[in-house]
Structures are given as C-alpha cells and as structure tokens.
Image: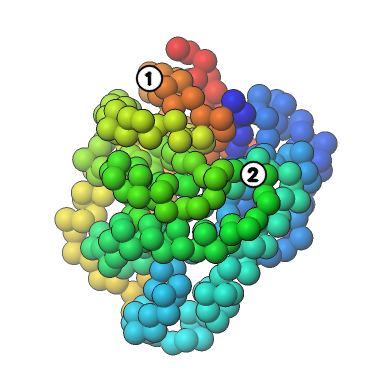
Amino acid sequence: MLTLTNIVDNAELLSAETEESLRAYLSACGLDGFEAIRCGMHAPALVPGLVPGVHLVFWADWVDFWRGDTKALLRKFGSRAAWEAYYGCAGPEGLLAQFRAELDYAKSMGARYVVFHVSDVSPEETLTYRRLHSDETVIDASAELLNLLFKGSEYSFELLLENLWWPGFSMTSPAMTARLLAAVQYDKTGILLDTGHLFNANPTLSDEAACLAFAHAVLDAHGGLCPRIRGMHLHGAATGRIVQKMLASPLTLAADFPGRFAEAYDWVTRIDPHCPLLSPGVQELVSRVAPEYLVLELSGTDLAARRPGIMAQRAALRKE
C-alpha cells in the first residue's frame, strides 16, 4: 500500500519548494508521494517520481453542458459567455481536450492512477439538496465521457472513480456502483472510496463512531464489489447536524452564478472539512478495504499547515 497526501501542482503555490524539500517533507511525514491536482493547464511544478496519483480536473456542474442543454445553461449562468468562461471552452469537445491534457500530464508524471469525480451538482442543488438529475443520468454521462477519453488508449495507469454525495456515484447503492463499473469500458477501472464524501451521503451522521459503522454497513452491502476499491481518500466529516440545521433554515440564493457559486463553495467547506479521522476503528476500516493507494486528503493552506493533521492521522492508524 502506498500512503500519499494531496497537493496542488501550481508553480506559485509551490514557489518555496524544491524537489529536495518535497522529498524531505514526504520522508518526515512517512509518506510515499503525492496525489496531485492541477488548477489550469499550466506547466507542472512537480517532477516525475513524486506523483503516484493524479486527481483529474472537474467541474461540479457539467452534465447539462455535456448534453448541450442550452435552456438549463441559460437558467444557471445567464449567458453563453458566462458558461463558456466557466468551462473554458465552447462545447463537449473542449472538455475532452482538457481531460486529454490531464491524462498526458498523468503520463508525464509516471502516475499509477488517476481519479475522476462521478458527480454533478449545481450551486442551487448544493444549497437546497433538491436534485436536478438522477444518479443514472450522471453515471451514464460520466461513462460516455470516459469511454471517449480512454477508447484505444494505451495508458498504464488505473482509472479510479470517486464517490460524492451528490447525483451520480455515492457508493450508497450497490446497483448504481455495478451500473457504473459495467458502463466504463477501460479494463483498468476501479473505485476510489472517499470516506468523508461517504459520510456526507448520510446527513443523519453526527459523530465519528456512527460514521465508521455506516462505512462498514456500506461495505457489507457491496459484498463482491468491494475488491474493486483500489484507492481511498481518508478524512472525516461528521457534519450531519450542520446539514440538518441548514436545510431547516430559510434560504435566499444569490441572483447571479458567481454569487451562488461562492455560497455553495463556502457551504461545502463547512460540511466537507477534510479533517483527520481519528476515532478508534479507523485502522480497522482501512485494513478491511486494503486499498492499494491510501491518500490522507486533508485541508490546509500549504504543506506546512497540513502536516499536523497528517501526523495525527498516521498516529491514529498506528494505535490499533
């Protein structure tokens, strides 16, 4: 098992780092490398050998754009210029081009796996929990996109599909998990189980013991599908009471897309804090899943700020 942590590959954010300092950081934290995500199509600041995993770019709300539903896009964004600015392109081919650049980046880094979010959620849905699309719609659109990307490819890395708590793949329905795995036609496809996202799929959970029990119940339900779990994002999110309080309160949405997006982003950071999962039983859960890639996916403004959380999570994993 490789133990990693998350990093943003951005020259400005990593301006104080060198390959030597990054390797020293990994060694001090007892880690094997980074799962990197890029923000924009800039030149990489990281180097091969540091990046076993790459988290692909994602747009939280993308299915309507992929399907060319201009009526829905106008309602959400207000203008074509606004949605083309958000997606960085004029149509689905532009999305595919950006994803292909991401896969090229992963190949250049020598990555062993890439991660794709199977999810679709607008700012309005984030703030109201009223769904615009079904799980089936999002899963089928994701499979269509991925099959176009990987058709005829000779990539060596695995494609790992990550659960979220929005429409799409939540890991709470074995039938939807099976549908997704059957639909993606890339033979090195598996699951990346994100623990915090799984906990957020059940807003009745408000303590870590209940979160861990829920995770085991989900694994029980998935039975023979569990060996398809190849990676794990480990972090906590016992935030059910926050969700229940928000949903019970009157809500007025911002009038424009940037305002609604900012509101949604602020909300997500409160219910998905990416904090260490420290309760007794965390090692038992990791051992049961036995992922090939364990990512301590924690929040923090920089690597130094994230280090105490990494050390606390590693200590919790050693206790049992």
> For the residue labelled by badge 1, is the local secondary structure a helix, a strand or a loop?
loop
Residue that appears at 64% across and 63% down:
100
The disc placed on residue 157 is: 2
Horizontally, is 114 left or right of 156 in the view? left
Most foreground residue, 132 or 112? 112
Location of residue 85 in the rendering, given as x and y in whole percent from the top left corner? 55, 78
How many residues crowd mark 2 within 10 Å: few (<14), some (14–19), many (20+)? Answer: some
Residue that appears at 44% across and 60% down:
142
Most foreground residue, 162 or 268? 162
Horizontally, is 309 left or right of 35 in the view? left
Locate residue 121: give its quadrant: bottom left
> For the residue labelled by badge 2, is the local secondary structure a helix, a strand or a loop?
loop
Q: Amino acid at mark 2?
A: Phe
- Above-or-below relation of 260 to 181: below
Location of residue 34 in the rendering, given as x and y in whole percent from the top left corner? 65, 39
Question: Mark 2 vs mark 1: which is more N-terminal?
Answer: 2
Location of residue 219 in the rendering, given as x and y in whole percent from the top left corner? 33, 30
- Above-or-below relation of 152 to 259: above
Residue carrying label 1:
281
Residue lying furthest top in this view? 320
Confirm or deny contact between disc 2 and disc 1 (CB under 8 A).
Answer: no
Location of residue 145 in the rendering, given as x and y in whole percent from the top left corner? 50, 63
So how many labels did they put on this image?
2
Most foreground residue, 228 or 31? 228
Q: Amino acid at mark 1?
A: Gly
